[in-house]
Every structure is written in C-alpha cells, then in structure tokens.
C-alpha cells in the first residue's frame, strides 16, 4: 500500500514534463498510470467530437482523465488522495491539432503551423471524492516560417512524437518561436500558476478553517 504524504496527490499522466513542473513548485505526487496494453480499449477516448471547439475538447479530456484516474485509484484500493489530470491541444483557426499519429502527420501539422499564430490550450482538472475543480490556460504562440528542410530535420529528431501540435517549446522547437503570449509552462503541458491556484482552492474547500 502506498502512503501518500499530507497534501500529496496522484498524477494521472505519463508526461515527464508534468512531473517536472509539479516538482518545480514543490507538489508531492505519486504516478497513477492508465493501462496501455495491446488489444485493450483506452480508458479515455481522445478523439474530438464532430464540431467540438478546442476549449470544450481540452476541458472534456481533462475532466474525463481525472474521473478515470479516480476510478483507477479506487480499483487499486489505494489510499484516497486528490487526482490531478491535464490535457493540452494546439488550435489553429478552431482546428484541433492533437498528438500526431505518425511522423508524416507531424510534418503536416508543422507545415500548417509554419508562420502562423496559434493557440495552445491546457486544461487541468483535480478530482477528490465528489469534487472536481477545473481550470484552463490559453496561450498564443507565433512560429517562424519553417522551411521544408527545417521541418524534415525536426521531425527526424523524434521530438515531435507524442506532442500536441507536433512540437515541444522547451526543446529544439524553442528556436522556432517568434513570440509567446501567455503561460510558458502551460504550453509545456501544465500551467503552474493556474495549477497552484486550483490546488489551493481544493485545499480551502477541504479545510475551510
């Protein structure tokens, strides 16, 4: 049995960036991973609904992942603690750019984002018993005009894999960013200010005095 420290939580995410960011602000956590076995259905279907707006999509995903994480905690008979989940997507003119299925799609995404100002939305949800707190961070990113060679070399590096919009601002793609308006940590995958405010709200509701 895992003993969760006071004010600790479960992180329902495989993202190493979210682990680093939580550690950066001193939040203690234990990983709560979903199953990823061949032949099994994923616990959360990440396919956007027809006509779904990017903000509605990331909110739905974050809430669904927090709910799924809470169920997984109960199924494993783990000590109850808040479950934090997040979802990040890139949006260009209301078109959702999630994680590329392969590197060919990654190259297509980068070509579409090349020279364009787009939004990066990260939703964070925290589930604790019947409470579910939610917040949304929206940032604007302007990429330089990318050449075909720049796209090809970046995709070949593998950094595009498993990244919303096929790029990582904290990695090699940082040199492509002309301007960022909003939260750098939000673009990475976990907005630190909004997340800390969300956890503080949850703490106040659990301990009002």
Image: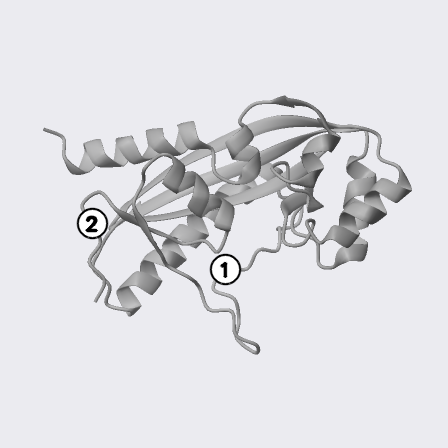
In front here: 51 or 29?
A: 29
Q: Would you name the residue on which mark 1 appears? A: 44
Q: Is residue 168 left or right of residue 190?
A: right
The earlier-in-sequence mark between 2 and 1 is 2
Residue 156: image tag? none
Give the number of the mark in front: 2 or 1.
2
Q: Answer whether residue 106 is visible to the viewer in this image.
A: no
Residue 60 x %, y %: 49, 46
Label 2 vs label 1: CA separation?
Answer: 28 Å
Instruction: Assign the C terminus to one quadrant of the image.
Output: top left
x then y, percent, for residue 182:
56, 23
Question: In this picture, is 160 found above or below 202?
Answer: below
Residue 203's x, y, as percent? 22, 35
Residue in the foreground of this view, choosing between 103 and 127: 103
Identify the residue under disc 2: 5
User: What is the crowding at mark 2: few (fewer than 14 residues within 10 Å), some, or many (at least 20)?
Assistant: few
Is 113 positioned to the left or the right of 99 in the image?
right
């Amino acid at each position: 049995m895992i003993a969760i420290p006071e004010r600790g939580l479960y992180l329902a995410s495989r993202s190493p960036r979210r682990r680093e960011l939580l550690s950066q602000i001193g939040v203690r956590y234990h990983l709560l991973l979903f199953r990823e076995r061949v032949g099994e259905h994923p616990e959360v279907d990440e396919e956007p609904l027809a006509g779904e707006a990017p903000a509605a999509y990331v909110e739905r995903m974050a809430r669904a992942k927090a709910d799924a994480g809470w169920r997984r905690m109960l199924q494993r008979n783990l000590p109850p603690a808040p479950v934090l989940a997040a979802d990040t997507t890139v949006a260009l003119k209301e078109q959702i750019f999630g994680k590329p299925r392969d590197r060919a799609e990654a190259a297509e995404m980068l070509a579409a984002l090349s020279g364009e100002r787009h939004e990066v939305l990260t939703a964070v949800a925290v589930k604790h018993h019947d409470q579910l707190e939610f917040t949304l961070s929206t940032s604007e990113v302007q990429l330089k005009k990318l050449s075909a060679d720049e796209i090809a070399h970046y995709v070949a590096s593998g950094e595009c894999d498993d990244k919303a919009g096929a790029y990582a601002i904290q990695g090699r793609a940082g040199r492509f960013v002309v301007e960022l308006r909003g939260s750098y940590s939000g673009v990475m995958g976990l907005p630190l200010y909004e997340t800390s405010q969300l956890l503080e709200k949850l703490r106040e509701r659990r301990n009002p005095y």
